[in-house]
Amino acid sequence: MNYRRVVVKLGTSVLTSGSQQLDKGHMVEIARQVALLMKQGIEVVLCTSGAIAAGREHLNFPSFPNTMANKQLLAAVGQSQLILAWSNLFNLYGLQVGQLLLTRADLQDRERYLNARDTLNVLLENNIIPIINENDAVATNEIKVGDNDNLSARAALLCDADLLILLTDQIGLFDADPRNNPEAKLITEVVNIDDSLRRLAGGAVSGLGTGGMATKLEAADIARRAGVDVIIASGQLKDVLLKVAAKETVGTFFSALENPLENRKQWILAGPSSQGHVVVDKGAEKAVTHQGSSLLSKGIISVEGNFSRGATIDIVNRFGQQISKGMTRYSAAALRTIASKHSNQIEILLGYNYGDAVIHRNDMVVFNTN
Ligand SMILES: Nc1ncnc2c1ncn2[C@@H]1O[C@H](COP(=O)(O)OP(=O)(O)O)[C@@H](O)[C@H]1O
Ligand SMILES: N[C@@H](CCC(=O)OP(=O)(O)O)C(=O)O
């Protein structure tokens, strides 16, 4: 099957070609490839980093202290330069762009999530290239997605893409960080994203980038669970986007999972940030991860955070590993009262009952932790 709708994420490392400023020569090369994909009938969404780098360049590399306010200043200055550059470069190919600046708060609220989805769709239907970045100028840590790898995966879900291409400064994911390990080997295909793979990706981050390969794996995990193929490849590889569209083997490929999560679970995975967590015992861990069960109060050992009923929380095992994320039917205070108690005690202990399941199976996403 040919790709129909593609999200392309460009890291700072690609936009600057490893320098301290935007490499417009390289950006025009990306614009050329996108224009050719569109001629082939493939719709393209760009998720572009580089606002902060562009801000530094535009202000002639000021020696500001590295505070949140100064980063927001750089992003505010740089984002306008970045979108101007993209707009001018796409105009060379007769194409128009539309800008979407998002934060986690926009994805957290289901209604705003659906609004962002409508905007993306209407831009694409009108042959306008959506250009997405995090709204760094207004985002505080609490409402940030935080890195554009995760943001691009969420964009892929929002617009129902069938492919996410993460372009970076390496030719793909290696079995060790190639910067410190010359023996590192390229992994051409990933079948399972598990803890042993995450350990390979824990390493360094290039010059101005955020997150390294760890955030690319998080992004790949979110996207493929929603039925989106993912490729990590080099932004410097000649005709990289055309090669991907022609199904040539490039970089590291993650095939979409065969049974993608339904829309509601995709949103649980990609939308709200977790407000807290419950630690569960061995039996509950097994029931949730291997038996397709809901989480019951009996298996809860402890509760962290101060969340309300309906909040999204993590389920964590005794070793601190996250095994699941879902929507709780009980507040943190209520859970502290009913933790480790049998479901038939809920009404007696609380004076009300929202059901036996603390997190119902239909409201939870389970992770692979091997
Ligand atoms: N296993 C790995 N394979 C490839 N790169 C890795 C790995 N572990 C860490 N890295 C680092 O991740 C960097 C890319 O991430 P990042 O700097 O955030 O780029 P971008 O700006 O493209 O998002 C690479 O330059 C590399 O040093
Ligand atoms: N939103 C930020 C980029 C954050 C980010 O994830 O950077 P990168 O790892 O280079 O993709 C910016 O525009 O500078």
Image (tube, grey):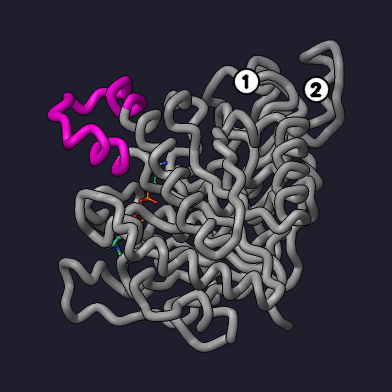
Which one is earlier in the sequence, the residue at label 1 or at label 2? 1
Does the rendering let one see residue 243? yes
What type is the residue that disc 1 sits on? Answer: Phe
Residue 56 falls inside the magenta stretch: yes
Q: Residue 71's spot in the image, x, y percent?
A: 31, 29
Classify mark 2 as within 8 Å of ligand 2 or not, answering yes or no: no
Q: Disc 2 designates what residue?
A: 346
Residue at 39% across, 61% down: 27
Q: Residue 156's spot in the image, x, y percent?
A: 64, 56
In the current view of this chain or complex, which residue is farthest to the left? 63
Q: Disc 1 designates what residue?
A: 307
Q: Quadrant of ligand 1?
A: bottom left
Image quadrant holding the N terminus, namely bottom right
Magenta stretch bounds: 53-73
Does the rendering let one see residue 190? no
Q: Residue 138's spot in the image, x, y percent?
A: 47, 24
Which image quadrant is residue 94 in?
Answer: bottom right
Query: Residue 224: which numbered mark, if any?
Result: none
In this view of the protein, which residue sits in the foreground, 23 or 358?
23
Residue at 55% across, 49% down: 131
